[in-house]
């Protein structure tokens, strides 16, 4: 089970880093605004961190769903207490 989680989280971590690089190559965190138009008053490092964690969460969710779809019915319904 631990290997499955590492197969999910490690590639998601790498892709979150790639997304972070691509997004902030064209977007300046100081120019970001909330949906209401108010400027984001967080530090640049806080914006980078929150965006990275968001990207990691989204890519991890996609990896988990892919992993679940790749499982057979027996694997999904297997009781680990046996």
Image (cartoon, rainbow, N blue to C red):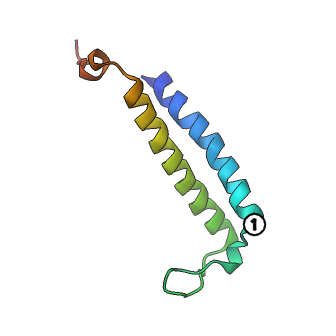
Position of 32 with respect to 22 (left or right) is left
The residue closer to the viewer here, 50 or 71, is 71
Name which residue lies at 69% across and 79% down.
31
State how many labels appear.
1
On screen, 21 above or below 80? below
User: Crowding near pointer 1: few (<14 within 10 Å), some, many (20+)?
Assistant: few
Query: Where does residue 32 sit, x and y in percent of width and height?
Result: 63, 77
> As rendered, which of 4 and 72 lies closer to the eye?
72
| Residue found at x 47% / y 25% | 4
Left or right of 49: which side holds 9? left
Compared across the picture, whether 2 is left or right of 25 comes to left
Which residue is depicted at the point 28% across and 19% down?
Answer: 73
The residue beneath circle 1 is 26
Tag 1 secondary structure: helix
Give the answer, above or below, for where 37 lies relative to 12.
below
Tell me the quarter of the picture where residue 49 sits: bottom right
Task: Kindly identify the residue that appears in the image at 23 percent across and 17 percent down.
Answer: 81
- Dividing the image into 4 quarters, which one contains the C terminus? top left
Examine the rendered structure and indicate whether residue 19 appears above or below residue 66. Answer: below
In percent of width and height, residue 36 lies at 49, 86
Nearer the observer, 46 or 75: 75
**Residue that extends furthest to the top in the rendered view of this protein:** 82
**Residue 71: image x %, image y %?**
37, 22
On screen, residue 42 above or below 22: below
Which quarter of the rendered picture does the N terminus lie within?
A: top left
């Amino acid at each position: 089970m631990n290997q499955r989680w590492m197969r999910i989280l490690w590639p998601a971590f790498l892709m979150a880093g790639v997304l972070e690089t691509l997004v902030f190559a064209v977007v300046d965190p100081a120019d970001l605004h909330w949906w209401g138009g108010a400027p984001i008053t967080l530090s640049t490092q806080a914006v980078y961190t929150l965006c990275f964690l968001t990207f990691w969460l989204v890519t991890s969710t996609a990896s988990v769903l892919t992993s679940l779809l790749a499982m057979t019915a027996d694997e999904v319904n297997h009781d680990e207490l046996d």
